Amino acid sequence: MKHTLAVPTTFLVLASCLLMAQTGPTPASPLFSRADSLRGMLTPLRSCYDVRYYHLDVRVDPATESISGSNTVCFTVLAPMNLMQIDLFRNMEITGITLDGGAPLSYSREFDAVFVQMPEMLTPNTNREMTVFYSGKPIVAKAPPWEGGFTWKRDSAGNPWVVVTCQGTGASLWWPNKDHQSDKPDSMLISVTVPPGLEDVSNGRLRAVKKLGDGWTRFDWFVSSPMNNYSVTVNIGTYAHFGDTFVGADTVTLDYYVLPVNLEKARRHFQQVKPMMAAFEKYFGPYPFRRDGYKLIECPHTGMEHQSAVAYGNRYLGGYRGRASSEVGLKFDFIIVHESAHEWWGNSVTASDAADMWVHESFGAYAEALFVEDLYGRSESLRYINAKKENVANMQPILGVPNVNHPGSGDMYDKGQLILNTFRTVLDNDSLWFSLLKGIAETFRYKAIDGSDIVRYVNRMTGKEYTSFFEQYLRYPKPPRLELMVAKKGDSVSVRYRWKADVQNFQMPVRLSIAGRLPQLITPTTSWQTMRMAGVRPGDFGIAEDLYYIDLKVNWVYLDPALPDR
């Protein structure tokens, strides 16, 4: 259905912003479309209001692979406005929109954006309520969780098994919302109605189960904490449930929903959750969503970090579906540990723009290494981290392009973990490092932030300037190269060294290892420096490569003692 409306001044401001978004992409970046800007930019039609609460009320029909229902958006007006943008994929039909329960509103649609005309100019600092009624067949996930959509499956007993994954693709593929990571509602009610014999498990706490007159059942789940929109989920099927508690700084309920055939296997396998919780609490602070609890829910794909309702599909194996880059990686379930780490990194501390998804994935990946360190020791953790080097492509930056829903390269996982390990070495103060990790998690709890907020926090808390470090590792595809030119002339050895980097005036300390001697700390810059020593051979030089992620180039040369010095 296409509705028309007059184009007000506010829309002209939007068009201007969208035009600016199309200019000047970085040389290595693809060109972006207007649809990308509508999805990724926080335009005046989005920044004019702040979402406080959603009530998503949907009916899911596995037989027709369709959904229908409504979403009520409770928002605070931040700037005078008579036009606002929400988002819903174009294949989903809108059957009506109302403001404060009044008469239907007019709207227009462009790509996956919906522009809603208000009946009057809305006043700042007022609270309003808009309800969008809709229905349709949401897109089917081709490769969940990597490509978003619904998964309509049947379990081994023949029962319907329905889940949704939408990170990156967009929560608006299945429900109307302000589909931008910068605006997390303070709380949310998720009401899901399913056919007889099935149940739904969603985020938060189960508030009510109501049998309806037609035999279908509605499950009401309430989320009491701020939540990013791609975390909102449904898990519909026939589940066996068991529970436990984790007692740390707080008491956290642990609830597990699995296929009945896997119940006993899950009871044994999920015992690793409590030591994982203890490790993450040690390094990042208490579990952020105690009020909403923690759930693992078996799913037909590999897994996803849905807040307080982590999707699990790793087949009860160690590593990633039974494989790992290192031996220690098989000692735990990768999906449980990595996806649960996102409760701190991604769900609590959220990147406000998809360009900064490294905040979610790099810290989430590094959490795996800290879990290994806590259970098996630092040396095993270093083996785990460094085994990931072979996975890094170094073809595109980790940092994406802002305002167009463009995350950086997949290197944000393994390379991100290596970068954080490198920064820990550069900092050379584990007490400070761990206080920084916990401080970031607690300072930005429940907030949507830019990656630069983390860099500024690190600089402030350390009293040093580390901006160039993060600029080099995040904005450019390749790590810095440490060039060593070692010359032996008689008994004397001279070492020339410098960084070759993309960031101007880049400098970073590094420990030079020399056979038979204590490591020597040097601080290379982008200019050549020289040091001299005696009693060593060129081949003795190196660095502790398990502590750094850099490109090391060493040139050795032997000089005739008769050759004049330059």
Image (cartoon, rainbow, N blue to C red):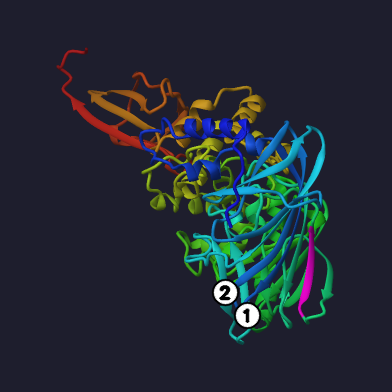
Q: Quadrant of residue 43?
A: top right
Q: Where is residue 245 shown, x and y percent of the image?
A: 80, 64
Using the image, determine if residue 441 lies above or below residue 248: above
Q: Quadrant of residue 397?
A: top left
Left or right, 466 with reference to 60: left
Using the image, determine if residue 106 lies above or below residue 237: above
Local SS, label 1: strand
Q: Residue at x 82, y 37 (%)?
A: 126
Left or right, 72 with reference to 531: right
Local SS, label 2: strand
* Amino acid of disc 1: Pro
Q: Where is residue 131 shown, x and y percent of the image?
A: 74, 53
Q: Residues within 10 Å of mark 2 (few under 14, many from 20)?
A: some
Q: Which residues are magenta?
A: 216-222
Using the image, determine if residue 382 lies above or below residue 495: below
Which of the two residues, 193 or 228, is positioned nearer the viewer here?
A: 193
Mark 2 or mark 1, which is nearer the start of the sequence? 2
Q: Which mark is residue 152?
A: 2
Q: Quadrant of the C terminus?
A: top left
Using the image, determine if residue 15 lies above or below residue 176: above
